[in-house]
Image: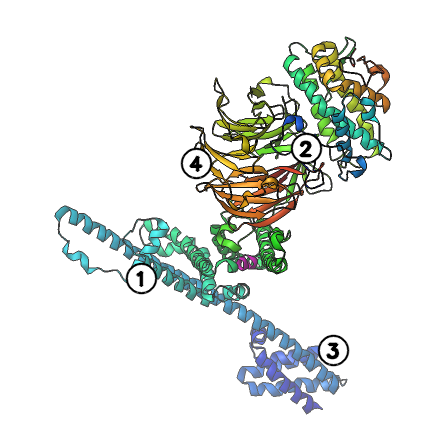
Amino acid sequence: MGTNSGATAGINNKPVGGANSGIGGVLSNSLLGGGGVGSGGLSISGLNAGGQNANVGGLVGGGGNNGSDDGNGMPGVGGGPNNQQATTPQYTIPGILHFIQHEWSRFELERSQWDVDRAELQARIAMLLGERKCLESLKSDLTRRIKMLEYALRQERSKTYRLKYGTDPPQLNEFKPSNDDVGLAGDVATDSEVPYSSVSNTTWRQGRQMLRQYLAEIGYTDNIIDVRSNRVRSILGLNNNAEHDGGGGGVGLGTGGGENLSPNINGNESNKRASESEGRHTPAKKVQQSNDAIILDTEAAVMANFEFLGTTEMSDDDEISDDLEMVATDNDDTDVKLDQKRPKSGKEMLTEVDLEAEVGEQLLNDMNLMTEEVDGSLGLGELAQLTVNNDSDGSYDANSKDGTGGSAGGAGYRKTWNAKYTLRSHFDGVRSLIFHPEEPVLITASEDHTLKLWNLQKTVQAKKSASLDVEPLYTFRAHTGPVLCLGMSTNGETCYSGGLDGNIECWQLPSPNIDPYDCYDPSVHSATLEGHTDAVWGLTTMQNNIVSCSADGTVKLWSPYNKEPLLRTYTAAEAEGGPSSVDFVRNEVDHIVVAYNSAHCIIYDTETGKQVIKLEAAQEMSGNTGKFINKVVSHPTLPITITAHEDRHIRFWDNTSGTLVHSMVAHLEPVTSLAVDAHGLYLLSGSHDCSIRLWNLDNKTCVQEITAHRKKFDESIFDVAFHATKPYIASAGADGLAKVFV
Amino acid sequence: MKMADGSTILRRNRPGTKSKDFCRWPDEPLEEMDSTLAVQQFIQQMIKRDPSNVEIILTMPEAQDEGVWKYEHLRQFCMELNGLAVRLQKECSPTTCTQMTATDQWIFLCAAHKTPKECPAIDYTRHTLDGAACLLNSNKYFPSRVSIKDSSVTKLGSVCRRVYRIFSHAYFHHRRIFDEFETETFLCHRFTHFVTKYNLMSKENLIVPINEGNENTGPGESEA
């Protein structure tokens, strides 16, 4: 037993001692200066309750023997247990084994802890190494810059020399900068805006490449960043590794490169400091640029993905340290280029990115749905074009709202219009509405004899609905019958209305912040243009002139604030019938286009009063009865006239040849109203089928349909409008409501 | 205008319609109106046919919800009162009528403001009509035009009381305007009948005399 236990203790102690090099060493140093064996003896005896004396003996013995050699220590330890056995015979083999096992696992645990510690320290070393490398490269970078600046200075000097003496200074050609230097020169030139115009684009790119390599190098050695960015990189599968290590390197530069570096460079002149701070920013820019390049390469689809990935990246934010955040921000900066706007704070960014991700997903869905749609709509005859998917819909490429639309091209981000404001205050159908050219303000004209002014920024939240109610700010009263049409001056200060009473009233718009219950100011109603003898149905403005058409058969041109406001009257041949709608030809001064009951449009020269051309389709001459034109609008930039017909068609005419360019069934019932957006890209149409439709003028396809109003008798929608500068569209209906969509 | 497409009558005012043809289409029976605005359509149709025949205009069709009927009528009154306001704007200025009065007995305070104010008569008129337009179109009180809560129906009485003062002011201070307007529209006559019939105002408040019993006679007899 004695030998046995001694042997076990001895055997056991050996590996323990070996493994214990850390703690064992510490213990023995502090207590005895002996090896692991001593400590082994100590722990064993400590476990045995009765072995106090032996324990001491063991310790002393161990200590003494250890002084000479390990082999001698063994018997000493062995003696300890032997003694113990004499005094405390309750040792059992299982007990000892259990104890040994317990100890073993404890030591294993400790060893793994030390392993972890060691790995951490190694990582720290690696990081410091990386930092050092990074600083070194920064230093070399800066020295390059110095050289480059010296070179530039020399060039400059030689130039002045040449200018002064007319010959090349002899010694200057000796110094030729290396390719790299030139490359860097290019970089600096772009970054610091020093005009090194001589540096070509290729060398500039080379320099960029090189710098990226530097950054990559640093990134690779930097374990911490590497480990952390690994995850991100795997997520951002699109970007190659170099890019992101570059990002890491950039971070290293950014954090380490600042103040810490300055002592190193302090030996150099003061202008180094300037370039140093530049140096801090340059790498980040590089990453940005390279990301940019990637984006340019991978185009729209990738773009969407990239944004989507941006989300994941951001959501990891909490655990990932600042460094990574910087990587993320860098990516975001690239987005900024395409987005034009991007909030800075992480949270906002997160939501924004989320939104965009959704858009991306939606886009994919849209495309799927649309292809299905196309399949489904085959063989539907002329109504095929009518099919539109209200879920996929929405492709008003709102340039003003979101820049991504432009970047992604045809498959870009598409906007869906949703009803946001309901304008309820009219007692009867709203015949016309018009937006202020700049403010979120509009005016509605109704069959209840009034006009109302609305400010979309003054809203009342309607309960349990997403839409907002707007209360009117001002009620214009002067008409003694239904008000049928509206026009507004280009500066948004004056508005004109034509009514069933045959009068055109001129109004000075009150401030959009007026108190709705302010005192009556008679000067708001600034003039009445009398001249028409019957209902005024059409009114449109161009600079200071207005043109109106009336059921009395005439079209009149007015300059409202002249002494003699009526400038000219245009009357068509009897056969054409009365005019129904009128518009200025937008791309041709002094031309107006008038739609007549005959379903023809006539373009007049306002100066001469002569007919310029008649828009009529030769083939369609037969049976014009149903083709009554409800509305005519001129394209804002092209020589195209668009007409809305009673026979559910929208037709496009060429103003120069007078021929029909395109004809399409647009609605299920007569088309009553048309509006073209300020850029001439989209057409909005309203119909008695209660819906408004948005059309892409490029390919004449319907991109969204919204059911907006209810019927009163057989009428539904009277007017539609685009805001010239803000993303609003609006519709006016026979149900007495006007709706604004965003 | 109506223009029969095939055999169906389309009740539309197309652009270019002459004012005499505006809304000039064959009457449509209420039962055939499937619109949510049927009551308004019906009332307007009756007025269009003969504005002087107030008794028929105010006769509620069978199976008609009384709340909606009163509500739609009041909307129509407020709408037509715009015409009176337009005329008053030309003559009734804050200098001539500094207060909203009818007889000398009362000065009416304008309820459109947070604290009722002594607005000049023309402001009172405009504010009252604007306020009525907002209230009657309020999504909170009148979210639907086919059914109306009882609690909202009680609002109609106060609107009636306020807009009636416009009639009374016009009658006592701008008699010429009132007479012209009344000759054309019979509005005060109709209104008085309306509030009496549906018990929306007390008799003693109806201070504008109207000649009872001659609804069907020609113009010029409805006032005084």
Find residue B12 and report its image quarter.
top right
Residues at marks 1 and 3, CA–CA distance in whole angstroms: 76 Å
Placement of A411 over or under B65, stated as above or below: below
Q: In this view, does A500 lie to the left or right of B72?
A: left
Q: How crowded is mark 1: few (under 14 residues within 10 Å), some or many (20 or more)?
A: some
Q: Which mark is residue A429?
A: 2
Residue A91's spot in the image, x, y percent? 75, 85
Upstream in the sequence, badge 4 or badge 3?
A: 3
Q: Name the residue under label 3.
A: A49
**Which residue sits at x=54%, y=82%?**
A67
Q: Nearer the viewer, mark 4 or mark 3?
A: 4
Instruction: Give amino acid for label 2.
Output: Gly
Q: Which of marks 4 and 2 is in front?
A: 4
The kind of residue on which mark 1 rests is Asp
Residue at which label 1 appears:
A180
Local packing at callout 4 (Cα closer than 10 Å; few below 14, some 14-19, many 20+) is some
